[in-house]
Image (cartoon, rainbow, N blue to C red):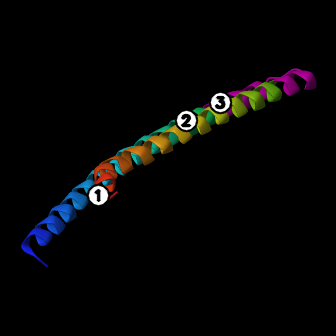
Amino acid sequence: MSQTAYEDFSKYGKEFADSGLKSLASLSKGAQAIAVEASEYTKKSLETGSAAFEKLLSAKSFEDALAIQTDYAKQAYESFVAEATKFGDLYSDLAKEAYKPFEGIVAKAS
């Protein structure tokens, strides 16, 4: 292996390692954001469920209880769909940010 080839190989190896570290930092940051969002969603869901249960206990008739349960189910479904969309966006952003440090290396290899 010539000196130039060795230097090029060494340079690309260092560049790849640096990109790997940057990607790992992005993954860590993204995973933390996802964990925070999951925690907030869980807390909000528990609070909403508790409030609905309290309303059910104070229902005066079967129709009132049914209306409370229907409202809760609708709200829970809408909340879930919104959160699923938000999680999808977070995971998409995570993948893009983790790949970003490698874009230059991939472009050079092409």
N-terminal of the two: label 3 or label 1? 1
Badge 2 vs badge 3, beta-carbon distance below 8 Å: no
The region drawn magenta spans 47-67
The residue wearing badge 1 is 20
**What residue is drawn where x is 42% and y is 44%?**
96
Mark 3 to mark 1 CA distance (whole Å) = 42 Å
Dot 2 or dot 1: first in sequence order is: 1
Q: Is mark 3 on a helix, strand or loop?
A: helix
Give amino acid for label 2. Lys
Where residue 109 sits: x, y (%)?
A: 31, 59
At a point 9% along the width and 68% down the height, the residue shown is 4
Image coordinates for residue 30, horizontal then vertical, percent: 40, 44
Q: Residues within 10 Å of mark 2 (few under 14, many from 20)?
A: some
The answer to whether 60 appears left or right of 11 in the picture is: right
Q: Quadrant of residue 63?
A: top right
Q: What type is the residue that disc 3 sits on?
A: Thr
Q: Which of 79 and 85 is in front in this view?
A: 85
In this view, the residue farthest toward the left is 3
Residue holding disc 2: 86
Q: Looking at the rendered structure, which numbered label has been put on residue 48?
A: 3
Which quadrant of the figure contains the C terminus? bottom left
**Residue type highlighted by circle 1:** Gly
Check disc 3: other Cα within 10 Å, few if <14, some if 14-19, many if 20+.
some
Q: Is mark 2 on a helix, strand or loop?
A: helix
Q: Position of residue 13 (x, y in %)?
A: 21, 65
